[in-house]
Amino acid sequence: MSQHILVVEDEKEIASLLEDYLTTFGYQPTCLHHGNEVIPYVEKHHPDLILLDVMLPGKDGIDICRDIRKFSNVPIIMVTARIEEVDRLLGLELGADDYVCKPFSPREVMARVKSVLRRTQPESTDNSDQLIAGPIRINMATHQVTIHESKLSLTPSEFGLLKAMIEQPERVFSRNDLLNKVQGYDFDGYDRTIDTHIKNLRKKIATALPNQDVIVSVYGVGYQLITPS
């Protein structure tokens, strides 16, 4: 069954273009043009990924992303004509997995859709196969992360970061290392998105391990996972 992609875009020519490309690449697209329609649709239909424009009539994309993250970890790619850094970071801090800037190449969007969806798919492995770092356990088949038996709810990007770092504990990763591992394609020059994903991941880990610094910054290099006790 083809994966269901929700396109939220008020410019109907752009929405139609994305719909055509998504269909050509084998996805099942649905287009919405007004921000107020999005939350009820997502709650009812549970799409596999959302392409979410920032500037919309009614509720804007930032508020929509914030509200969706209260009840769902569905992958979200923000689409924006704004180029200011704060807009990009704000969307990611709210839990978006990626962003693209207008004007964009539809093929670039398809590459990012494919990359994000790939990170949501369970590994082809036995359910018992796990990655373990102290009390942190990743079930590779179900994409479930637990700390001391408490389930951690992660976005696909956060899951990819944690997986990459647990696979090589104590290694110091540069931002570009993590971008290549998590995004899965040549990301065009915005490595500070990793900082935001790491910040969110740290917050979630801290809810279960409040007194330990599990992911530490290495000045001038990047990040390192310290195996917790």
Image: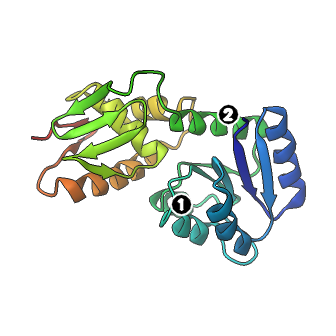
Mark identifier at residue 111: 2
Q: For the view shown, which residue lies furthest in the bottom direction?
A: 58
| Kind of residue at badge 1 | Gly
Residue 117 lies, in percent from the top left, at 59, 38
Side of 85 where 197 appears, left or right: left
Does dot 1 land on a helix, a strand or a loop? helix
Residue 42 lies, in percent from the top left, at 65, 61
Q: Quadrant of the N terminus?
A: top right
Residue 151 lies, in percent from the top left, at 31, 50
* Residue 167 vs residue 124, the one in the foreground: 124
Mark identifier at residue 91: 1
Kindly tell me whether residue 223 is visible in this rendering. no
Instruction: Tell me the colour scheme of the image.
Output: rainbow
Residue at (71, 45) in percent of width and height: 4
Residue at (38, 38) in percent of width and height: 161
Q: Point out the tag, 2 or 1, that comes first from the N-terminus.
A: 1
Side of 97 where 111 appears, left or right: right
Asked whether disc 2 touches disc 1, contact meaning CB atoms under 8 Å apart, the reply is no
Q: Is residue 83 above or below residue 123?
A: below
Side of 6 where 170 appears, left or right: left
